[in-house]
Amino acid sequence: MNAFDIIGPVMIGPSSSHTAGAVRIGRAARALLGTEPVRAEIGLHGSFARTYKGHGTDKALIAGILGLAPDDERIRFSPALARQAMAEHIKSSLNFGAHPNTALLTLWGAAAGPVSVQAASVGGGSILVSRVNGMEVQFSGQYTTLIVLHKDAPGTIAAVTELLAAAGVNICNFRLARRQKGGAAVMTIETDGSFGAELNRAIGRLPNVLSSTLLPRM
């Protein structure tokens, strides 16, 4: 246990789970979209759905989508800021059968998307992203993370991990999900330390890789 686990995150708002964690969920979705969002749909489940107005969860999610940090004083004004930048719609009665503090965000850019992200705020400002575009993933945002969408073909995983190894990048967590043999698959790779965008672009150019998204530690 470290000091962050004991005292919690530096943040604006009444609840680390409902505010700081919600901001980080929004920021993760924005990073996966890879551009400025112009439209957002927000689905809330469980405790998020029941208490989001009192805890400001809606404002926190919108703030994260806009790129604000958990300690940004503008979080309370995020709906007004959003009206200047994008359209948003909130659904507060979704049932995901998941963690009670779960949100499903779908974002569009002017020429990108949609990207959908399902994630839970699991306490102390920490999050766990469980689905991206309907594909199972698992990452926390506490590490530099690669989301690699690819064709399920022999040698693809080896090619990605060999590039990382050659660059001196150590993998601390790895998860693979696929819908069917030979179809679409996604690697979730959490790494120690950080690395530049050029390595991510090199992975994106590998055979059978459809896209590679680099998410800095949040």
Image (spheres, helix red, strand yellow):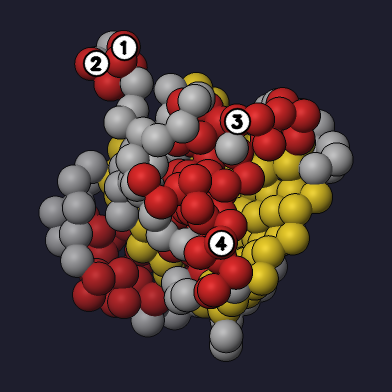
The secondary element bearing badge 1 is classed as helix
Q: Quadrant of residue 119?
A: top right
Q: Mark 1 or 4 closer to N-term?
A: 1
**Badge 1 vs badge 2, beta-carbon distance below 8 Å:** yes
Alpha carbon of mark 1 to alpha carbon of mark 4: how far?
A: 33 Å
Going by the numbered disc 2, the residue's amino acid type is Asn
Callout in the foreground (3, 2): 3
Measured as percent of width and height from the top left, residue 59 is found at: 57, 47
Q: Which mark is residue 80?
A: 4
Circle 3 is placed at which residue position?
A: 55
Q: Is residue 175 visible?
A: no
Going by the numbered disc 4, the residue's amino acid type is Ala
The secondary element bearing badge 2 is classed as loop
Q: Quadrant of residue 133?
A: bottom right
Q: Which mark is residue 2?
A: 2
**Badge 4 vs badge 3, beta-carbon distance below 8 Å:** no
Measured as percent of width and height from the top left, residue 54 is found at: 65, 30
Alpha carbon of mark 1 to alpha carbon of mark 2: how far?
A: 7 Å
Going by the numbered disc 3, the residue's amino acid type is His
Left or right: 197 with respect to 43? left
Callout in the foreground (1, 3): 3
The secondary element bearing badge 4 is classed as helix
